[in-house]
Amino acid sequence: MSTTDSAERGLILHNVTIWLNGRTLLSLDATVRPGEVLTVMGPSGIGKSTLLAFVGGFLGHDFRAEGRILLNGRDITALPPDRRSIGLLFQDALLLPHLSVGGNLMIGLSPDIKSRAARRQAVAEALAEVGLDAFADRDPATLSGGQGARVALMRTLLARPEALMLDEPFSRLDAALRQQVRRLVFEEARKYGLPVLLVTHDPADAEAAGGRIVELG
């Protein structure tokens, strides 16, 4: 990889400013390199999730935003959400109840994986990677909070995103599970070389992430 190519890798938020009703919610200029985590902290209502909405391409019409979003050298500012190659994890796993665990992972698979056998193999390998071998036929309703979080993570990664956004994804887990899932998410992000944008109110999340911290407000 050339020096120029290397310099372009990652998620770049260039002079991003977001307003609501004429009031500046946030201004941010930041670069998140592959495998790094940028943690955005602040009280509720300060604009943390609004930043994720802007980066993800689903900012509400009530807001006004300026600035550019670059992902691995590609300007994605004006692209629709499904063309931005950004994965998103929420507080809840949001697994579809009418599908099995394996079925939930299937819908996350990249369309590049076409044959049925290859898709099943990809799902099996993803479950094995997070210690859930033989869980493909399970009903999502039977999963624990930690198991559901791991399935949601692998569903996101199977779509082969180029960046990952985390919207308080550990907040509903108990303390022991929170530490376990947090470690898994950050390890997987480093393994896949994904820049990560983490929104949280928990200083322990920021400490575990180990990257730059931006405090809003």
Image (spheres, rainbow, N blue to C red):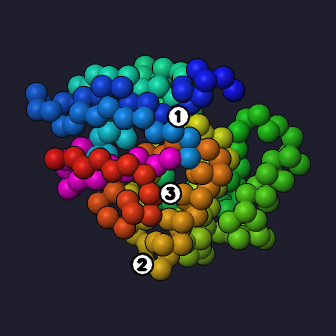
Q: Which mark is residue 10?
A: 1
State the mark number for residue 82.
Answer: none
* SS assignment at label 2: helix
Please give the count of numbered marks on the rendered protein.
3
The amino acid on which the numbered mark 3 sits, given as a three-letter code, is Leu
What amino acid is labelled 1 in the image?
Gly
Q: Position of residue 141 (x, y in %)?
A: 57, 71
**What's the amino acid at mark 2?**
Ala
- Is 202 situated left or right of 105 in this image? left
Q: Residue at x 54, y 25 (%)?
A: 8
Mark 1 vs mark 2: in front: 1
Query: Residue 171, image x and y in percent?
Result: 38, 66
Q: Measured from the top left, where is residue 100 in percent x and y? A: 68, 62
Q: Is residue 21 above or below residue 149?
A: above
- Residue denoted by label 3: 94
Q: Nearer the viewer, residue 26 or 114?
A: 26
Question: Residue 175 shows which numbered tag?
Answer: 2
At numbered mark 1, what does the secondary structure look like: helix, strand or loop? loop
Q: Is 97 rendered above or below residue 197? A: below
**Separation (CA) of disc 2 from disc 3:** 21 Å
Q: Residue at x 32, y 32 (%)?
A: 29
- Read off the magenta span: 36-47
**Nearest the camera: 160 or 155?**
160
